[in-house]
Amino acid sequence: MKTIRVVAAVIKDKDKIFATQRGYGDFKGGWEFPGGKIEEGETPQEALKREIMEELDTEIEVGELIDTIEYDYPDFHLSMGCYWSSVVSGDLVLKEHEAARWLGKDELMDVEWLPADVDMVGKLLF
C-alpha cells in the first residue's frame, strides 16, 4: 500500500484549536487540521509553514511534534505529523477550504473529523 507523508498544524490560540473543512477531493466536507504533503527536500516544519501560507495566507510558528498519526485509508496509508502551531502574521484566509472554526475543548466533537484526524483529536489535551 502506498504511504503518503503529510504534516498538520494544530493551531492553538488561548483555549481554542483551529479546524478547517475540506473544500475538494474525495474527503470534501470532512474536518481536518490544516496542512499538506511534504515535498522532496523539505523538513516537516518547512512543509507545514509552506502549506499554511498556501492554504490560509498566514505565517505560522511551528512548535513541538504532538504525535505522528498512522492511519490506513482504503487506498493508501497516511503518516501525519501533527505539530503545535501558532499564528505569527495573517488572518487565516480560506483559500482551499469550505469553512473553518475555532473549537474549544468541549466543542472538538461538534464537527465531523476525517478518520485520521479523529485519532489526533483524541490525543489533544489543552
Image: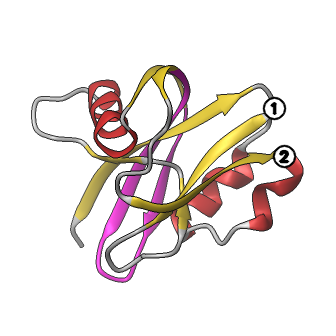
Q: Which residue is mark 1?
A: 15
C-beta proximity under 8 Å, tags 1 and 2: yes
User: Residue at (70%, 67%) from the top-left corner?
Assistant: 111
Residue type indicated by callout 2: Lys
Vertical placement of residue 1 versus 60, above or below: below
Placement of the N terminus among the 4 image quadrants: bottom left
Using the image, tell me which numbered label, if any, was put on residue 89.
none
* Disc 1, SS: loop
Q: Residue 94 vs residue 37: left or right?
A: right
Q: Position of residue 102 (x, y in %)?
A: 70, 45
Q: Position of residue 112 (x, y in %)?
A: 65, 72
User: Residue at (31%, 75%) from the top-left corner?
Assistant: 25
User: Residue at (75%, 37%) from the top-left corner?
Assistant: 16
Q: Is 61 part of what is drawn in magenta?
A: no
Q: Residue 13's image quarter?
A: top right
Magenta span covers which residues?
66-87
Q: Position of residue 115 (x, y in %)?
A: 55, 70
Nearest the camera: 52 or 75?
52
Mark earlier in primary sequence (1, 2): 1
Q: Which residue is mark 2?
A: 105
